[in-house]
Image (cartoon, rainbow, N blue to C red):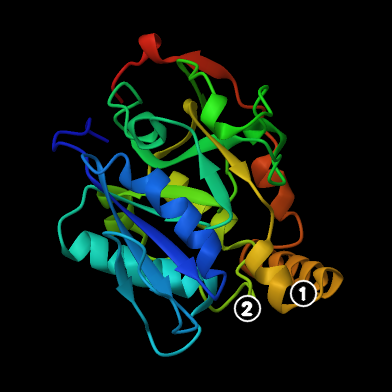
Amino acid sequence: MSPRSAAPRCLVVVPVFGQVEMTHDLIPEILRESDLVDVLVVDNRGDYAPYAAERVIAPGTNLGWAGGSNLGFRIAFREGYTHAMTLNNDTRLSPGFFAGVLDERLPGDAGLIGPVYDDAGGHGWQKAEFDGPAAEYEPVERYWQVPCFDGTAMMISAGAWEAVGELDERTFGKYGWGANLDWCLRVADAGFGIYLTEMSYMNHLGRKTATANTHNLRYLFDAIRGLRGGMSTVYGRKWRDKFKHAPQPRALAEEVSA
């Protein structure tokens, strides 16, 4: 893959279902970097009231996380953005968050990029050493090449999107757990890198929207069943073997364009 050439600009897609106040708390943290990003709220319930300069689209039905994200991605790349990110509304972002994930010192083959955060997200390498408030995070000029990462904040480049297409909405159940893993595998198979950067950090408040509408244990049971069933269907019973290699950190100053 060739290095990025166009000045980066990202459309941040926030799929929501209720929890309007929580989204309102997040919007200013996105828009403080309006020189790099725009924000689109995908209103799956149809009751979102805009807070500031965010765009809002109501699809008229609940598309869920994967479907809402895909809708935003289609809009982003049709409109010429270099990147698009799906971002949960139950997050809080470090200062300079988007400058970090869009840092041009990251390798030129970057297809999927994410932050570190205060939750392991099912993948130990995404857990930051720092576990305090995002507002107090000090960026670290280091990144990791990883086999996969969590879908809470997941940015894809236009090139990777063109190569692999959308998140799989159908295979992984209504909560979409596992669609992020499948996406990572497809992006890697297409020749792109998958990276986490310690320049960006977030707090994850943890499944606030899902558990507001579904009992937590039922949600977890259905989500995990969708993940395991979907991955086994697509990749076979030994799908976990695809994620066994240990990531290694690299300093941003060591970047060599792929």
Q: Is residue 205 left or right of residue 148?
A: right
User: Mark 1: which amino acid?
Assistant: Asp
Q: Is residue 84 left or right of residue 207?
A: left
**Percent x, y of residue 106:** 35, 25
> Label 2, on which residue?
174
**80 relative to 49, above or below:** above
> Label 1, on which residue?
222
Residue drawn 70% across and 65% down? 227
Whole-number angstrom distance, CA of label 2 to CA of label 1? 8 Å
Determine which quarter of the picture holds residue 216.
bottom right
**Percent x, y of residue 6:** 13, 38
Residue drawn 59% across and 20% down? 248
Q: Quadrant of the C terminus?
A: top left
- Asked which secondary structure carries label 2, the reply is loop
Give yes or no for contact between labels 2 and 1 (Cβ–Cβ under 8 Å).
yes
Relative depth, front residue between 226 and 98: 98
Residue drawn 46% across and 59% down? 24
Does any portion of residue 19 appear in the rendered image?
A: yes
